[in-house]
Amino acid sequence: MRGIGTSIVEKLIELGKEAGLKKIRFYTLPDNIPMIRISKKPSRSTYSTFP
């Protein structure tokens, strides 16, 4: 089961690609493993940082 945050980020990534964005930055907590996995998918031009 996916959380709503994961669904929102995946949709934002999709929309960003359609808009021609090369990278999307989002912030997440170090223990938010599902979000970290999204940022590390090989097909993604995304990255996450930890405040």
Image (cartoon, rainbow, N blue to C red):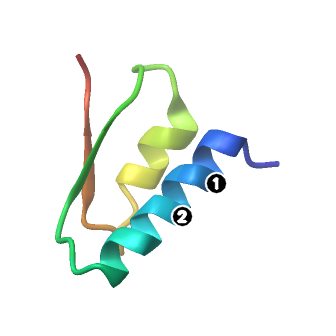
Q: Which mark is residue 34?
A: none
**Real-space Cα distance between discs 2 and 1?**
6 Å
Q: Which residue appears at 40% of the width and 20% of the height?
A: 30
Quarter occupied by residue 16: bottom left
- Residue denoted by label 1: 7
Looking at the image, residue 31 sits to the left or right of residue 2; the answer is: left
Looking at the rendered structure, the kind of residue marked 1 is Ser
Q: Nearer the viewer, residue 18 or 49?
A: 18
| Mark 2–mark 1 CB contact (< 8 Å) | yes
Q: Amino acid at mark 2?
A: Lys
Characterize the local packing of mark 2: few (<14), some (14-19) or many (20 or more) Cα atoms within 10 angstroms. few
The image shows residue 24 at horizontal and vertical percentages of: 25, 55
Residue 18 falls in image quadrant? bottom left
Which dot marks residue 11? Answer: 2
From what the image shows, is residue 5 above or below residue 14? above
Q: Secondary structure at mark 1?
A: helix
SS of the residue under disc 2: helix
The residue under the point 29% across, 79% down is 19
> Residue 23: where, in percent of width, then height?
19, 61
Q: Residue furthest left?
A: 22
